[in-house]
Each structure stands twice: as structure tokens, then as C-alpha cells.
Image: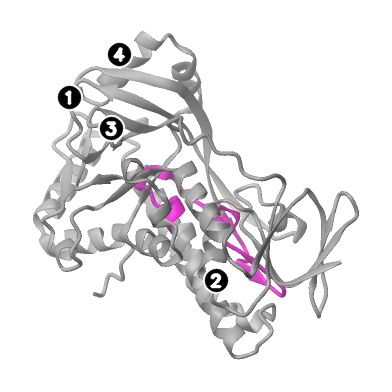
Amino acid sequence: MKSADLVIVGAGMVGLALAGQLAACDCRIILVEQAPPQFNLEQTSNRVSAINFASQSLLEEIGAWQHIPAQKRSPYDQMEVWEKDSFAQIQFDNQDPALRALGLDQLGFIIENQQIQHALYEQVKTQANVEFVFDKLQKLGISENGAFLTFEDGQMLSAKLVVGADGAQSWVRNQSHIPLISRDYEHTALVCNVKTAEPHEQTARQIFAPDSILAFLPMKDPHQCSIVWSLPPERAAALQACEEADFNKQLTIAFDNRLGLCHLQGSRNIYPLVARYARDFAQPRLALIGDAAHTIHPLAGLGVNLGFADAKCLAQELALHLAAGHDIGDYRHLRRFERKRKVEAVKLLGSMGVLKELFADDHPVKKLVRGLGLSLTNQLRPVKNQLLKQALGLPTHL
């Protein structure tokens, strides 16, 4: 039976980021995944993330940022948000003092998920304290002295701590019988890549309509964007199935023709949007990070950044207790991580829910209030600075 200090279940972006931050620690780490990850880096994927400054810094510290080709890192230096058929709008740009103080030229980067995962995987594979095990898990057992994982072939692993970084349908969370609070957003996300007649000018754009939220995320090609279109399920399915010419027309109209006629590139994929929040982010011998602990609406592009923040917080706590010779699976040493990350997750889940509901009605009075509110916010530099710092992943008191 193999043994380790830490077993991370899930070799996605967040699980790999946790292992990468513990490279200098005196601990044995085993990363468990059903099969080795497969990458098709020559083909552009439509699953992307908006990486903020905090996540970029984390990837740089691990050494993974350098593995992402420069031509696959798409910077954006402006952001525009507006409401359809309304004067409500707000803009952010790279001239903001908060960015200049950090020496930043951009608000963030749009990067394919597979590029991020591949960069982390290549870096973590070089760590002397990490071993990968590719097999399917069958059972998780927790005792006072350790955790035990059983594979389908009968092999076993023991560890002081098991971390579930295995996504929204987390096997670790389910095995641990941790209750899940969930709320169906009653929306489905349609994602794809498009070419636009007009250049995107490195600007991320998002438009709110009564029944949808549509984001255009700029890629390296000045005429290519990745879109995330949050829609009622029936409409999303219809848009996925309709003729390409009809889809292009409907998308162009929905986006207020901001970048001219849109042309679909590749496939259209859809997935349901559900807010999830685990009752416990930690228990004796167990911790949850990333989508295993929480999922939020993609309208703010914060999903993977929130997961990376979980990984960073847990890594800091583990490094502290490893250095002190403590038992890292003792719940006393996981409580601070749990408190910090639950507060942040609740705050963002609440904010996303309120924001979605706020724009989910085209009542004239609500549209007027939204217009006045966004226009006022757009003119108040201190308020915009606070919003920008939150988007960058910076402490808002700085």
C-alpha cells in the first residue's frame, strides 16, 4: 500500500496548482486521476478562462506561466459592460491607477483552459515530491489517524490529508457525504469561438438582456473572440442546433452589432449553469477546493480564479503546518482555510445571484434604476477602483 502526506484527487487546473505551490515543502504528494490528461494544443479550444493578476502571479510563482506560449496568452486592456436597449453602461481600462501602481498594461488574459492545464502538468511533473497515479477510485475511508483510498483493482493509498479538486460532481465530496446547497440558475451556457468583421481591440465585452447575458472575450487574433452566452435552456439548445448562418445572424443582433457580422468557428457546446456550495470545505483528513467546493455563474469570469485562490490559501496553510511538524490532516489546522474561503465563496455567490436577478427584468423602472446606477458608478473613480481590484484578485483595502 502506497502512502503519502497529501493525496490530491483531480489533476485539473486547480489540483495541479495546489501541488505546484508545495514544491519546496518536505512532503510526499500523490495526484490521482482516472487517466493521463490528453491535450490537443494545435487545435483552438472554446473553453477559456479570464486569468486575473492574482492568478497570473500564482502561475508565475509555480513556474507554469512560462510554459504557456505567448501567442496563446491573449491580453485584454479594456472592459465594457452595458444593457441592451438602455443607457446603462460601465467601462474599465488599463489607465486605471490601480493597474499603473502594479506596473500592469492589461486587465487580464484570456487563455484556453487546456493551455493552462498543460503548463501546470508539465511543471508539476518535474517536482521530486509528486507522483501521479492514473486509476479509478472506488472508496474513501476516514479514520482518526489517516485517510484510505481504494482503487477498483484493489490497490490502496493512505494519506494524512485528501484534497478533493475533482470538479463540480466531486467524487471526494460525495464519498464524504458532505451536503451540497445548490440553486439552478435556470440558464444554460453556450460557448464557442467566432470571427468578427471588426477587430475586438483587446476589449472584453458583456451585454445584459432581460433573458440572457452574452460575453465576448478577445483572443490573440484581432478578429477572434470566445463567447459565453448564458440563456434559457430551450433557447440555448435551439441556438446550438440551428443552421450556422442563422446562428451568426442571431448572435450579431444579440450583441448589438458591436463588432459587425459574427462568423462561427468550430463547434457550439452547451452546459447547464448551477450555483453550488458545499456545507463543509474541510473535515478531519479532508479538504475541498475549486468546483468541488463551489460553482458560480460565469458572468464575471471568476470561476477558475476563485479556485486558484482556494489552492493558494490551502497551500499556505499546509506549508505552515508542515514546517511546524503538525499533522496536516487535523481539522484544527484546516479551519482557517475553511473560514477564509467560505466567506469569499459566499460573498461571490451572493453577488452573482443579485447581479443576475437585477438584470433579469425589463421593467421600465428597474431599467431606469440600473441605468442611473451603472452610469453613476462609471463616473465615481473610487468605486470603480474597488470593483477593479476585486476583478484583479487584489485586497480591496489596498
Q: Residue at x 47, y 60 (%)?
A: 308
Q: Which residue is mark 4?
A: 249
Q: Nearer the viewer, mark 4 or mark 1?
A: 1
Q: Secondary structure at mark 1?
A: loop
Q: Which residue is mark 2?
A: 23
Front one among 284 and 148: 148
- At label 2, the amino acid type is Ala
Residue segment shown in magenta: 277-305
Circles 2 and 1: CB atoms closer than 8 Å: no
- At label 3, the amino acid type is Asp
Q: Relative to 45, is 397 above or below?
A: below
Q: Residue at x 45, y 37 (%)?
A: 47
- At label 4, the amino acid type is Lys
Q: Nearer the viewer, mark 4 or mark 3?
A: 4
Which dot marks residue 362?
Answer: 3
Q: Which residue is mark 1?
A: 198
